[in-house]
Amino acid sequence: MKTKLITALLLISISSMAQELYVYTEPASNMAAKSIGLRLNNFIMPESYTAKTNYHMIPEIMVGVSKTTMVHFDAFLSNRNKGLSVEGGSIYAKYRFLSNDEVQKHFRMAAFGRYSFNNSDIHQEEINLYGHNTGFEAGIVATQLLHKVAISSGLSFIKTLDNGGNNKFPYGNLDRQAINYTLSIGKLMLPKEYTDYKQTNLNLMLEFLNQFNLGSGKYYMDIAPSMQLIFNSVARVDIGYRQQMSSSLYRTAPNGLFVRLEYNLFNAY
Amino acid sequence: MKTFLFLIAAIISIATNAQVSKVSLQASGLTCSMCSNSINKALKTIDFVQTVNPNIKTSTFEITFKEGSSVDFDKLKKKVEDAGFTVASFVAFVNFNNTEIKSNEPVKVGDKTFYILNAKEKSLNGAKQVRIVDKGFVSTKDFKKNTLAAPTSGNGVYNVTI
């Protein structure tokens, strides 16, 4: 009986809506309470002005704290210096404060915050709290699910501080502040009809990722298509490509590949 | 201590009859199989649940219970909410035994008290489908349709329609 219970507790799943499990952004929905998600995020971004390719590896642990709150912990590694070295980390929290659920539909809103620290040298005007800059972010996200399609939009304020290791932010003091705004669309492509939890899911996503610097007035606008496979309702593979459409900010490696492996443990603790 | 508690629990369980044979609940706020699975797995962790039979297409779960166990409706609802979703419909299959009923007055069945709204019959016998209409057990839209007889729900007291 006890073994059976433990097995039941160890049985695993993913919590959120497939169509809104976006690759580059987070939706307003959270993971289930008491679930844990493990991620390995990989950015492979060729530098614009050299022959070098930047590789950023970000292991991530996600915890469903309650039905409304979840927390992410990230470690930032990159090949900027010799080999692969740890440059920093990040804590991210999201709180869902609005939930209008209907059968096969919902509208939800959440507030989120992030604090990141990084010891690498600062080499671009773009502020990136996901593996480049020390700083914090606060924002809101709204997500609408309509059967097989989900649309989500986020707006956040970011402020960067000096990086660790005496790596100061080399631009103007006012340029430390920026607004990030995103639009994400996801569609469930397969299966056509659900019969089984073991069916492999295929989702296609299209995301628009933008930044506007409040000091300099400079900006970037990126587009990021991606595909996602979900196996056995527990494991997930995301493959995306981020492409700059327009930018007035100095950026060293804006375009490139993103590959994420994810595994979810349901009722994990 | 644990064995002792278990024994007591077992004795209490045997003493109570199976008043609730089955619950059919529908969850809202989801479409995909993974979300459905998260509810499915959460419901299966409940100690008094015997089986969960999900219909992924309609987000409906048929739940049966272990013999002699006391069924806690609030716990079933909480599991759906903890998975990140909402209960849109909650129908319990309740066994009545020539129970006299009056509209908007409490009816005791086992450890539960039902306020049957707009009851037409005078007595109930055998298995009947009882739909809970308290907040959190129906969609927000449906919740507004009924005037509740018992203002405080939960803890075994429910407003229902038959």
Image (cartoon, helix red, strand yellow):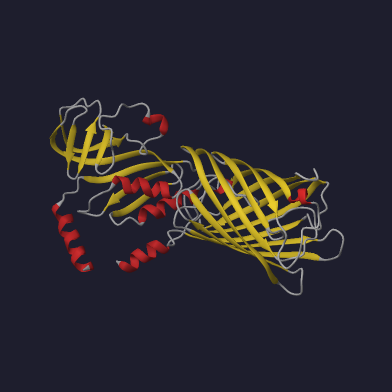
Residue B25, image x and y in percent? 36, 42
The answer to whether any part of residue B87 appears in the image is yes
Note whether B80 is above or below A77 in the view shown: above
In percent of the image, x 64 and y 59: which residue is there?
A: A116
Q: What is the quadrant of residue A5 in the picture?
A: bottom left
Residue A75, image x and y in percent? 63, 65
Left or right of A238, for residue B120:
left
In percent of the image, x 13 and y 35: which residue is there?
A: B99
The answer to whether any part of residue A209 appears in the image is no
Residue B112, image x and y in percent? 21, 42
Q: Report the number of discs.
A: 0
Left or right of A254, for residue B158:
left
Which quadrant is home to the N terminus of chain A? bottom left
Q: Residue furthest bottom?
A: A82
Note whether A247 is above or below A39 in the view shown: above
Which quadrant is home to the C terminus of chain A? bottom left
**Residue closest to the eye, A185 or A180:** A180
Q: What is the quadrant of residue B121 in the picture?
A: top left
Residue A92, image x and y in percent? 58, 55
Q: Residue furthest front?
A: A173
In percent of the image, x 23 and y 45: which residue is there?
A: B20
